[in-house]
Amino acid sequence: MLLDRIIASRSPARTVGPVLLYPKPYGRLLAAVDVPVDAQASKLEAFVSHWYQEIRTGAKTGSDPQAVNYKHPYWYTYGDENFDGGAYFGRWCVEAVVAVKAFDMDDSQCLGLEHYPGDLLRPNGPSTHPARQELELPAALAVESKVGFWAKLLRRH
């Protein structure tokens, strides 16, 4: 139902299904879409705040033959280890951004939340997340990193 409604926001002829296949966590997002405009921001914030925890518990539904039971999404544990090996690609609730765009919702209460990728809606704006403090390199590494490729090759400093 929710995905159909998002698609129908751009393709009005889309048939909207009658069932929300995964009420946990997506029931909160559907509620945010359905409430009056002045209440959407707080409902959206509740969805984003609970999304990661609720997605962990897995989708348990027997309401429709298309629904699939699973423990948690395959990517849920990516990033718990092996950051340098490229296993982590982000734990962003893209669904929230899609709903904000499709239904012109107020996302002001979600800005800066860990799992809300509000920057996707603001490609030219300042980041919606607080700046991270960069780790300082040891002095020996910092100096070495300023030496260019050709200088290293020709042993010039």
Image (cartoon, helix red, strand yellow):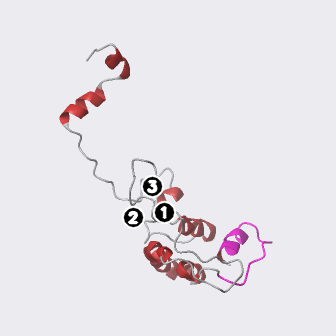
Q: Position of residue 154 (x, y in %)?
A: 33, 13
Q: Amino acid at mark 1?
A: Trp
Location of residue 97 (image quadrant)? bottom right
**Gap in angstroms between the C-alphas marked 2 and 3:** 20 Å
Question: Residue, x 68% and y 84% (percent of image)?
Answer: 19
**Gap in angstroms between the C-alphas marked 1 and 2:** 12 Å
Question: Residue, x 71% and y 77% (percent of image)?
Answer: 66
State yes or no: residue 14 in magenta.
yes
Q: Position of residue 83 (x, y in %)?
A: 39, 52
Q: Position of residue 113 (x, y in %)?
A: 40, 67
Residue found at the very far bottom of the displayed protein: 63
State yes or no: residue 50 in magenta.
no
Q: Is residue 111 above or below residue 43?
A: above
Can you identify the residue that label 3 sits on? 88
Q: Secondary structure at mark 3?
A: loop
- Checking the image for residue 112, the label placed there is 2
1 vs 2, front mark: 1
The answer to the question of whether label 1 and label 2 lie on touching residues, with beta carbons closer than 8 A, is no
Q: Secondary structure at mark 1?
A: loop
Depth check: give the residue in front, 77 or 148: 77
Which residues fall within the magenta stretch? 3-20
Can you identify the residue that label 1 sits on? 92
Question: Residue, x 45% and y 49% (percent of image)?
Answer: 86
Q: Amino acid at mark 3?
A: Tyr
